[in-house]
Structure formats: structure tokens, C-alpha cells
Image (tube, rainbow, N blue to C red):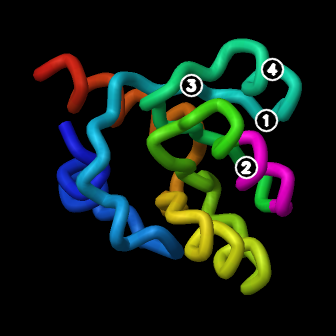
Amino acid sequence: MTIRDIAARLNLQVLAGEKALEREVSGGYCTDLISDFMANGKPGCLWLTIQTHMNVVAAALLTEAAGVVLTGGRQVSPGVCQKAEVEGLPLLSFPCTTFEAAGELYLLLNDK
């Protein structure tokens, strides 16, 4: 399933990386610790987090994540959005909790 499909089905707001929404998503990973994501995030996964700082973009790029979903309706600075856009990283927003986002993503990716 592509990021575009997931965004449409979960009504995610696209903050950056519109041109890369056709990326295939292999799974998801939920953590707010950059070090945890760097150690355990897999290429092609969607990272679900409440973190909104610039290091999120860097970690997602280094791990070759498909994209990042910012949960909890958190605000993100224009600078972070601009960096994600320049790097071609899909950055999306979900108004509900990480728990709810993970549950919805799991159901979508596993045809439940």
C-alpha cells in the first residue's frame, strides 16, 4: 500500500513530500526516541511519533523510512516542513494518538 493510499484512507494531512506519496509502505514503527528508531526502524516503514523537531527528518532519511506520521495533532515548524520537502520525505499529520494511528495503520496493512 502506498503512502497516498494510507493518507486518503486515514484522512492524514500531508505537510511535506507530496511528490513521494507513491512510496510503498512495508510496515510501521512507533517510538518517540530517535535512538530507538535509528536502531530498529526499517527501510520502507512509516514512523509514527509525537516528535516534531528537525532530527526526525534526519533519522527518517538515514533509516530510509517511507515517511513520518506526526500524531496527536502536534504543530510542526515551517523549517521542519521545508527540510522534509527539500529531502523528498513525506511528512504527515494525524490528529489522534499514536496508539490510534498504529491501530488504524495495522488494520490497513493487514487487510482487517
Give the amino acid at mark 1.
Asp
Give the amino acid at mark 3.
Tyr
| SS category of the residue bearing label 4 | helix
Give the amino acid at mark 4.
Asp
Residues at discs 1 and 2 in contact (Cβ within 8 Å): yes
Q: Nearer the viewer, mark 2 or mark 3?
A: 3
Would you say the magenta stretch is mainly helix, strand or loop?
helix
Residue on which the image places disc 3? 29
Tell me the residue at 65%/45% (across/down).
Answer: 61
Residue on which the image places disc 1? 32
Dot 2, how many residues are within 10 Å of its Cα: few (below 14), some (14-19), or many (20+)? many
Disc 3 to disc 1, C-alpha distance: 10 Å
Tell me the residue at 73%/85% (across/down).
Answer: 78
Tell me the residue at 63%/56% (across/down).
Answer: 72
In the image: residue 84, left or right of residue 92: right
In the image: residue 96, left or right of residue 84: left
Residue on which the image places disc 4? 36
